[in-house]
Image (cartoon, grey):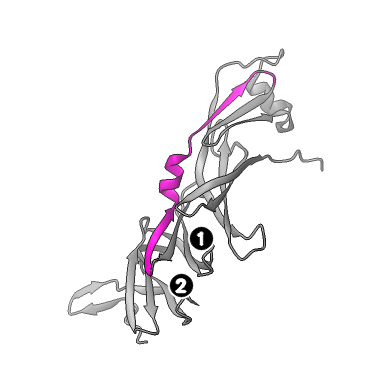
Amino acid sequence: MTNHFNSPQSAGTLSYLAPQVIQTKFGDINGDGFLETIFLVGVQQPDSPLWKNITLTIFYVQTQQMQQFPLKQNLGYNPTIFLGDFTGNHIEDILVVSDTGGSGGIINGEIFSSINNQVRSIFDAESFNNKLKYSVNYVDHYKAVVQSSNPAKRYTIDLQYKGADYLAEIYNPDGTLKQPIEGWVDPFSGLYPIDYDRDGTYEILGYQGIAGRYHADGLGYVENVLKWNGHEFMIDRQTVSIFGEDLS
């Protein structure tokens, strides 16, 4: 296959940035028994690791045809491809992840799958994030309550591991709050394919940071395990992990 994606070129006095291949993988993504060439194409910004116009491109060896799919969030750093079966049909799907570069470590993520011989997007992190609603509130007696609406869960985090100086800024000596404090839960900062059942089908472990008074005031992570139900990804189980007290 001829690589038509080169480094920046110029025509006369006009210079422009041409698309480049970012990463290439090989896998059978439609079940035809042939390995397709799957690669990401984008335009790298001058003197920057930032990529724009990131596009998933699939070259079919058997038919010698090519398909291109612009990503829904097509701007990011360090774009990567992972191939694995997320839908349980024994055909490899395509997970594309990139970093947004924001202070919260937020990522972009999108999954493409061949369903009825048609490749389409079946998941993107931004749309799924919009379905997830949380509240984070500090309460009396050195605790923070994280509440999820989907699924409906409540988690209580003991803040005493934060230390006396931290607590004294927030609480009165009797353990009551000096004033109401609300935190928040970030969008996804990690999407990790894991085959929990070792059956060849991957679930997705999604991490979301829990922030207290400000971003660096981390309280832990909401961890959602996403599983394909035949039509869409749903939360199979949800937990909250917290940071441990430093004993050294």
At label 1, the amino acid type is Thr
Front residue of 240/169: it is 240
Of all residues, the one furthest to the right in this rendering is 248
Image position of 69 (left or right of 149): left
Q: Point out residue 24 in the picture as x, y percentages from the top left corner.
A: 46, 76
Among the 4 quarters of the image, the one containing residue 110:
bottom left
> In the displayed structure, would residue 150 be above or below residue 52?
above
Q: The magenta stretch spans which residues?
A: 117-141
Q: Secondary structure at mark 1?
A: loop
Q: Give the distance between the C-alpha atoms of the residues marked 1 and 2, in whole angstroms.
A: 12 Å
Q: Secondary structure at mark 2?
A: loop
Front residue of 108/229: it is 229
User: Label for residue 68?
Assistant: none
Residue drawn at (70%, 16%), measured in percent from left and top? 175
Q: Point out residue 104 in the picture as x, y percentages from the top left corner.
A: 51, 45
Instruction: Inspect the magenta stretch and tell me whether residue 208 lies in it.
Output: no
Q: Is residue 223 visible?
A: no
Q: Point out residue 39 in the picture as x, y percentages from the top left corner.
A: 42, 73
Dot 1: within a 10 Å radius of its alpha carbon, few (fewer than 14), some, or many (20 or more) residues?
A: many
* Residue beneath disc 1: 87
Residue drawn at (48%, 60%), measured in percent from left and top? 97
